[in-house]
Image (cartoon, rainbow, N blue to C red):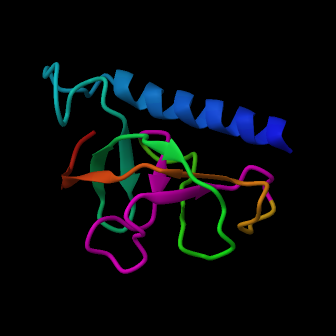
Amino acid sequence: MNTLKSVTAITLAGIIALTTTSVNAKERTKGRGAPEIPVIYVTSQNLYYDTLLLKELPYNGTDNFQQLQMAGPTGVQTEFGPTDVGYYGGRWWVDANPNGMMDEDDFYFLCPLLGPGRTEP
């Protein structure tokens, strides 16, 4: 399963990187909103947040990770964001073995959302 996790990590990094090449990217070259900064869409808030992919995390057997889905207007979305109950501060899981459950075969990582959110990618 380590190969599957590696493929998932590479795919995730690629998808997050692709969000930076959006036609809607602003003309800034540094900082929040810059074209090279990944963007995650939060469905409950209808807002887009810049993010930083910091590191992979080990699965600790708890439910204190939030699911990140490969869907939505930027290619990466989640249900909850900052100030929402259910937001775990950027601790995400991707269901690498599509069984709908968190387990050791999935991919876990730290990728905090940087506020404030905005209405366009």
Residue 61 point in image, percent of width and height:
69, 73
Is residue 90 shown in magenta? Answer: yes
Quadrant of the image containing the N terminus: top right
Extreme residue toward the right, this view: 1
- Count of marks, rendered view: 0
Q: Is residue 37 above or below residue 81?
A: above
Q: Is residue 39 above or below residue 49?
A: above
Is residue 88 shown in magenta? Answer: yes
Residue ID at (64%, 37%): 9
Residue ID at (29%, 49%): 48
Of residues 5 and 44, the one drawn nearer to the viewer in this rendering: 5
Magenta residues, dominant SS class? loop
Q: What segment carries the magenta color? A: 74-98
* Quarter of image, res 42: bottom left
Of residues 72 and 18, the one drawn nearer to the viewer in this rendering: 18
Residue 80 point in image, percent of width and height:
39, 68
Residue ID at (65%, 68%): 60
Quadrant of the image containing the C terminus: top left
Q: In this view, does 94 lie above or below 26?
A: below
Residue 55 point in image, percent of width and height:
49, 43
* Quarter of image, res 95: bottom right
Apparent side of residue 58 relative to residue 4 in the rendered image (left or right): left
Residue ID at (53%, 73%): 64
Apparent side of residue 65 relative to residue 58 in the rendered image (left or right): left
Residue 33 point in image, percent of width and height:
19, 34
* Quarter of image, res 79: bottom left
Apparent side of residue 40 relative to residue 95 in the rendered image (left or right): left
